[in-house]
Amino acid sequence: MRIPIPFVLYMMVLMLPGQVPAQEPVKPGGGNAEVTPASHGGHAGHGQRSPKTWQLPDMVDARVTLWRPDLQSETVALDDGRVAIPRTGLASYHALVAEDTSQGRTRVAIRYDYGHGKPVSSSPEDLLDQPKATLELVPSPIPREHYRYISGETWGFTLRYQDGVAADVDVLLRTSQGSQLTASTDINGRAWFTLPEDFKDVKPGRRLNDPGSFRVQAALEREGHQYETRLEAVYHPNPAHWRSTTLGFWVMGGGFLAGLAIVRGFGRNREESA
Amino acid sequence: MNLSIIRKLVQIAMFAFLVYGSVIVGYYTADKLSVAFPALTCAYDFQSADYCTLIPFQHQMDHRVGQALVAGTDIIRGVMPLVITLLTFMVLFIFLNKAFCGWVCPLGTFQEILNMLGQKLGLRQTQSLPEPVVQRLRPLKWVILLLLVFVFPLMAGIGTVDHDLGDPFCKICPSRILTTLAGGDTRQVYVDSSSNINMVLSLIANFLFGLMVAVALTVRQPFCRICPMLALHATMRKLGFVRLIKNAKPRCVKCGLCAKACPMDIREIHTEMDARNVLFPDCTLCGRCVEFCPDKDVLQMQYIQFPVFSADPDYFKKRKKAQGRWDKWTLRKGKR
């Protein structure tokens, strides 16, 4: 159930004469060596995000497709095992799919990135539901817009094969910090992982910690053809490292006692004036 | 059945929908109803059906308007998202006007339930706050709206204050704590040691929540009196379809029962004898003043000029009796 009022109003405003033209997407350029999101770099630099790249050293001959939030797709150039992630100017998740098919074997790598820009009427659910490969790992769910994968949190991934799901298949999760977890897909094709708390030397504050990356992968053989798929994503240290819930409840208790003292004061004033 | 009971049922239904409604509308932000809702329903609640408009206001002042000013780019491009949010808010607001406060807001509902609990526990109620206290509290909602929702986020976007002041109202809002705790999520109750600003704001948030809970047991609507959403509603109350009208002459004898019934201590509704429109800035359109007015049609709630609920002597008598029965019954002594 969705009433895209902001999207409708945005389109109406754009139709008014003399309105600002739609933001042109930035052309892909060279960029960072790492897959991590561009650093925030202080507030004056906010919004001037440096281009992101996706490293695919093991898939130099892959065909890379960008799926936009509006479910349009386009081919993206793979240059020496690196993809410069294009900015579409659309505010929602995008999917990059690298597919490499050789004799008897298909390898797929997928990553989902959140873009900033114009609002869209579609939901991330639409992009996730869109089939992008014969065998793919689909985040179920993907972190909500403006949120992220956090260490210590449990997330599901559905292994989808053609029009259905693949149950009872081993799935492996590896992080850039060196952790490794395994799980099996259930009857709904879903495997659950609690992202490990494996960040070393966590500093207080999200901006002070570089995110890590993780990869979820699975393989399946069907009719003599080997399918391998992996999902790559970024995760961050859990804010619980610098936030204390226990202290929070104590402070709340202090506020409660202060409130009782205040209302007692009202009662006493009422008695005195009476 | 009376208006107060109907309102309570609507409030409970809206609380359930707004706090847990993602099962109906969807999990993602793009699925939400408007992302500019005219009540304190929170984005930190992952099960919510919609987000309050104060969230995008802060975000856009910080990341759009502030950014445009720093970068020297077209300011219209920076302001347009803010305009879209404001228009979205207004599209919803005009249908219920300030009744979003009195009938829909989860935090308002919570405070009313706390007050009922305090009554039933036999705690001595403060029927009305002293007038000097009321007058001192009233400007606070404007200060909070201006500074925490607009000025500090803009200054954070420009870079003149720390980035941690980009969303200061969200960081102290009791609804963030209420709606997440209601969903079983304790992660929004914390003291944040990542920076001095975050520590102060998180201390204020938790203290304020505890304070509000205690005060609400005996004082009606403590946080509503300083809520920036109330102030935002007040700026647009003349646009809304729901109105509160007073036909003072010839029947109003200034008995003062309307002001006594008012949970927001709007004494002006009692003293105002000339103006017809008595939808004052602090009004939440709860309708209690109309219920407790003993004179026919003196006070009236209208929808696009059509009366939907008018003061009536017969209703008043029944309502007063019902209130008396309700007030006498407490959990401590049982029904007398």
Image (tube, helix red, strand yellow):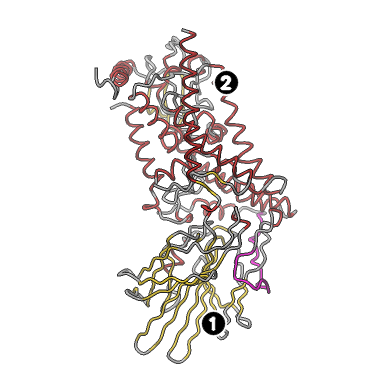
Q: At x 50% / y 42%, what residue is drawn?
A: A247
Q: Is mark 2 on a helix, strand or loop?
A: helix
Q: Is residue A104 above or below residue A263?
A: below
Residue A20 is inside the magenta segment: yes
Residue A117 is inside the magenta segment: no
- The dot on residue A37 is none
Structural crowding at the residue carrying mark 1, measured as other residues with C-alpha within 10 Å and reported as few (<14), some (14–19) or many (≥20): some
Q: In this view, does A224 lie above or below B163?
A: below
Give the main secondary structure, helix, strand or loop, of the magenta stretch. Answer: loop
User: Residue beneath label 1, please?
Assistant: A63
Relative to B1, B94 lies left or right: right
Position of the N terminus of chain A by quadrant = bottom left
The quarter of the picture where residue A117 lies is: bottom right
Residue at mark 1: chain: A
Farthest residue, direction bottom: A103
Q: Could you tell me the amino acid type at mark 1? A: Arg
Q: At x 61% / y 39%, what residue is drawn?
A: B148
Q: Could you tell me the amino acid type at mark 2? A: Gln
Q: Position of residue B259 (x, y in %)?
A: 45, 17
Farthest residue, direction front: A201
**Both labels 1 and 2 in a single chain:** no
Q: What element carries label 1?
A: strand
User: Residue beneath label 2, please?
Assistant: B135
Farthest residue, direction top: A274
* 1 and 2 marks in contact (CB < 8 Å): no
The quarter of the picture where residue A172 lies is: bottom left
The residues colored magenta run: A19-38
Q: Position of residue B205 (x, y in %)?
A: 53, 38
